[in-house]
Amino acid sequence: MATTLIKNGRIVTAVDDYFADVFIDGETVAQIGKDLQVQADQTIDAKGKLVLPGGIDPHTHLDMPFGGTTSADDFETGTIAAAHGGTTCLIDFAIQEKGKSTIEGLDTWHGKADGKATIDYGFHMIITDMPVERMPEMTKLRDEGVSSYKLFMAYPGVLYVDDGVLYRAFRQAGLDGTRICMHAENGIVIDEIVREAVADGKVDPKYHALTRPTRMEAEGVHRSIAIAEVADVPLYIVHLSCHDALEEVKRGRARGVNVIAETCPQYLLLDQSIYDQGFEGAKWVMTPALREKWNQESLWQGLQFRDLETIATDHCPFCFKDQKELGRESFTKIPNGAPGVENRMSVIYDAGVVKGRIGLNRFVELTSTAAAKAFGLFPKKGTIAVGSDADIVIFDPDRKETISVDNEFTHHMNVDYSAYEGREVQGWTETVLSRGRVIIRNGKLETRGGGQFVKRVGVGELLR
Ligand code: URP
Ligand code: ZN
Ligand code: ZN
């Protein structure tokens, strides 16, 4: 078993901030202390750098068939890009084919990932139907380490399920000690608004945003919280994008419902005006859509006041050429999703820590620890402690980079554009260890492969 000594770094977790050395024996952190006097196979000097728990991105879509095509990153390219950006574990979404077994869906996703990943990964299961006779499968999924499920109020005819399915799945998940992830948008009403827009010839990408009112996201959040409250299950609202939806989360929490919520860098940093550039706007056609800029202040406040729990990417990349272009005639045909798995740590460090909106500990909590706790990975992952997996990022807090599809230090995703093209950021992932292996050294890929499926346990204690 190889050993590594990381010397002279500033270790920051969700609660600690101190200077010490970290000794890694094989896959785990074995010792932490001042001026450790131990022999190691390799020593990494982290002087002037932050030593952080590897990022955990609990929301990605790799190799996912969607919108008539397949997301452009698979488990090989997507996990390498994630590693470059300081993420050492992601939770991707396996999909149940409607009418078929969820276990088959899980097998399919294992087949996509097995032997390809460079960082560790888990799966949520997207449930597309749940007849009573299939409910025992949910318990089986939990026993297989898939302890969370995503259900959709959006995308009628594709991933949408009705409130009866929601309740059944919520109830079983609650009984099994697992968690529900909710895509909360009233897709039935939205489809009517879309139909009206298309009938009026409003087919440019900007109408994707204009046909998805924030009130319809808020309604979905409100309804799913009410159903979760009755079904008695911990709820996680995914990709929360706006003030109206956040207000519903706050209301639910104020009356004691076990609901937490995720937002994404794109909702904190980009806004609806980006669609005012004709078909180019297709690059940011995602669901929920980007919102009016004023919503961003509410989201930052939600992060500061702990009404928002995590920052994930919802990385769902489609190339502009040939994939986004499927929607040249109408925004309804543009595959929904945008890339970002590689940029999350840098853009949030820059906009959050450097700009003074959140502290360093909160940065670690939002990008790693809280997801580990919400999804049954803690304390193996999400912190640096004796006995935890040696998933560690050596982060340069001073280095500046301009994010670009052409910048070899910011773009390894298999997609032909960057959602953050031209944005200058301070804070860059220099070296990354995944269970003790150096996978990125000084910004260069050193080890390919070796990522493993992580079985997750059920939901722990409340996160408040
Ligand atoms: O536009 C998005 N978000 N695409 C991925 C699917 C989803 O709803 O998360
Ligand atoms: Zn979604
Ligand atoms: Zn998603």
Image (spheres, helix red, strand yellow):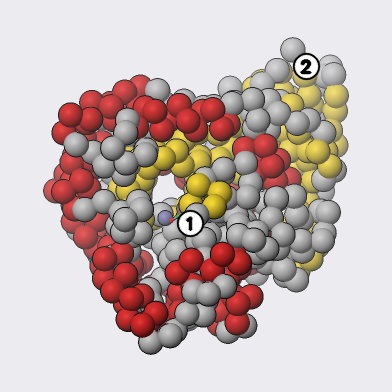
Name the kind of residue labelled 2 in the image.
Answer: Ala
**Res. 378 visible in picture:** no
Quadrant of res 41: top right
**Residue at the image position 16 percent from the left and 48 percent from the top:** 164
Distance Cα–Cα, label 2 vs label 1:
45 Å
Callout 2 crowding tier (Cα within 10 Å): few <14, some 14–19, many ≥20: few
Quadrant of res 435: top right
- Describe residue 155's horizontal placement relative to residue 277 as left or right: left
Residue 4 appears at what percent x and percent y? 78, 24
Residue 163 shows which numbered tag?
Answer: none
**Residue at the image position 50 percent from the left and 40 percent from the top:** 91
Residue 182 appears at what percent x and percent y? 34, 52
Residue 67 shows which numbered tag?
Answer: 1
Q: Earlier in the sequence, mark 2 or mark 1?
A: 2
Which of 433/421 is in front? 421
Residue found at the very far bottom of the displayed protein: 200
Q: Is residue 46 above or below residue 332?
A: above
Q: Is residue 184 above or below residue 192?
A: above
Q: Is residue 11 above or below residue 137?
A: below
Which residue does the numbered mark 2 point to in the structure image? 2
Callout 1 crowding tier (Cα within 10 Å): few <14, some 14–19, many ≥20: some
Name the kind of residue labelled 1 in the image.
Answer: Gly
Number of numbered discs visible in the structure rendering = 2
Residue 412 appears at what percent x and percent y? 75, 50
**Res. 203 visible in picture:** yes
